[in-house]
Image (cartoon, helix red, strand yellow):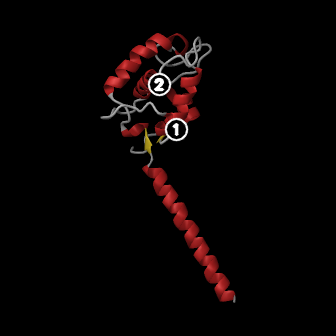
Amino acid sequence: MKFTVAVLTLAGILAFGAINARGTVAAQGAKSQWDGVYTAEQAKRGDALYGQYCATCHGTDLAGGEMAPGLTGGEFSANWNDLTLGDLFERFRISMPQNAPGSLSRQQNADILAYILSKGTAPTGSAELPTQTEVLQQYKYLAQNPKK
């Protein structure tokens, strides 16, 4: 009887470890902004939109202003680290610009997000950043490049 309990306990521990390891591998396989998730052209469009809709509050250098936080740098990275690009996208899709919340299209918001990522030194890729929140939820925002 004791032998059976010991074997079942060991089997349970091994099964838990296997499931936990699989979750870790899946998390390591998740995409982040460091995987080139936007194009240079998209960031260029976002630059123009940022200047038109965001720079007044967040600053031309994305460093923030009196009433608005910076969109690059250590504090921004710490606040958004390990959340998703979908979380970030939804935050400003719904609440920005301050004088007309929710007035920008999904494409405009994705372009602005691409610009913000470019200013945070995330590399460009071959495909544009998607406009669907559900898809953007699959991309993590990581403060540190895991490839370095």
Q: Are marks 1 and 2 in contact (CB under 8 Å)?
A: no
Mark 1 burial class by Cα count in 10 Å: few <14, some 14-19, many 20+: many
Label 1, label 2: how far apart the Cα atoms are: 16 Å
Kind of residue sitting beneath label 2: Arg
Is residue 89 or residue 147 the one in the foreground? Answer: 89
Q: Is residue 124 left or right of residue 85?
A: left
Kindly identify the residue that appears in the image at 49 percent across and 25 percent down. Answer: 72
Give the answer, above or below, for where 50 lies relative to 29.
Answer: above
Q: Is residue 139 visible?
A: yes
Kindly identify the residue that appears in the image at 58 percent across and 33 percent down. Answer: 79
Kindly identify the residue that appears in the image at 56 percent across and 72 percent down. Answer: 14
**Element under disc 1:** loop
What residue did someone put label 2 on? 106
Q: Quadrant of the C terminus?
A: top left
What residue did someone put label 1 on? 84
Tell me residue 11's x, y (percent). Answer: 58, 76
Tell me residue 27's x, y (percent). Answer: 49, 51
Q: Is residue 101 left or right of residue 31?
A: right
Give the answer, above or below, for where 19 lies relative to 39.
Answer: below
Give the answer, above or below, for where 44 lies relative to 83.
Answer: above
Q: Is residue 140 visible?
A: no
Tell me residue 115's x, y (percent). Answer: 41, 23
Is residue 112 or residue 131 the one in the foreground? Answer: 131
Tell me residue 133's x, y (percent). Answer: 50, 34
Identify the image quadrant of residue 76.
Answer: top right
